[in-house]
Image (tube, helix red, strand yellow):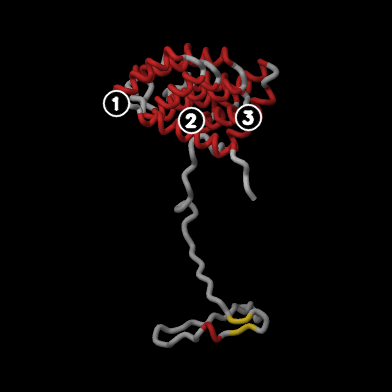
Amino acid sequence: MSSTAIRAPSFTLFSSLSKPPNLRNLKSPSLGPARCVLVTMSSRGKNRKPLQKGRNPSIEAIQTVQALKRAQKDQHTLDRVFHSNFKRLLKLDMMAVLRELLRQNQCLLALKVFEDIRREFWYKPQVSVYADMVTVLASNGLVEHVELLIQSYLKIEAGDLGPEIEGFNTLFKALLSSNNTKLAMECYCLMKQVGCEPDKSSFKILITGLESKGETGPSVIIRQDAQMYFGESLEFLDDEEEMMTQQVLSESLPKTT
């Protein structure tokens, strides 16, 4: 052993039979009484929140989004990127790419990605995904693409749709906000066709949306259905109207400081 040894720091070990010194009596010249800080160690992944589908794209997904955006002006380059980048992604990464493109309002790229996703063996149609796409397409004025999405894709896949009540409600909002009352009624019929029973929110969205557009005929049909589910009075509609009135009144009152 070398004569020059590294001196290890000394630690004071307290025996279980001896009483440890009172830490409050230990003082530092500049820091005052010493404080005991409890430090806990845990596994890195034990308390980590689960990644939400489509919300946290992987590095591969982000790189694919960037490559698709760069290549979109040239069809040949775009096809090559789809083959070399997108088609090699995992399922969750493909969905993450779709949602990220929608978030960035890259509507045409998102449509092309969605068409490729529909060809995957694991693909199962979800109303919530259609609702997200319709929301973005409608907000960007792509009405024809919205109609294509509903008529040529969603209706064809009706047999594989699940009873996603929130997805349908979001879809109703998106269609009515873009003045597409006809498609909203068609999606309402599709909702009942797949065995998804509308809730109070469904009827509120449809009735108030249709009546605000002057569509009294379809609104009467929805009201009749709502009465079959919740009775003749439809009190939840009155509550909604009262809340909206109170909100308008509160916004019109002068603010006091």
Q: Position of residue 230 (x, y in %)?
A: 31, 27
User: Which label sits on residue 231?
Assistant: 1
Disc number at residue 1?
none
Residue 83 higher or lower than 43, as above or below: above
For discs 2 and 3, the disc positioned in front in the rendered view: 3
Residue at horizontal 55 percent and vertical 39 percent from the top: 250
Q: Residue 176: percent from the left, percent from the top?
A: 51, 20
Residue 177 placed where, x, y %?
A: 54, 22
Q: Which residue is mark 2?
A: 91
Quadrant of the image occupied by residue 201: top left
Question: In the image, is residue 215 above or below residue 70?
Answer: above
Front residue (pair 229, 74): 229
- Residue that numbered label 3 is attached to: 104
| Mark nearer the N terminus (1 vs 2) | 2
Residue 203 lies, in percent from the top left, at 40, 25
* Pointer 1 local density, CA inside 10 Å: few below 14, some 14–19, many at least 20: few
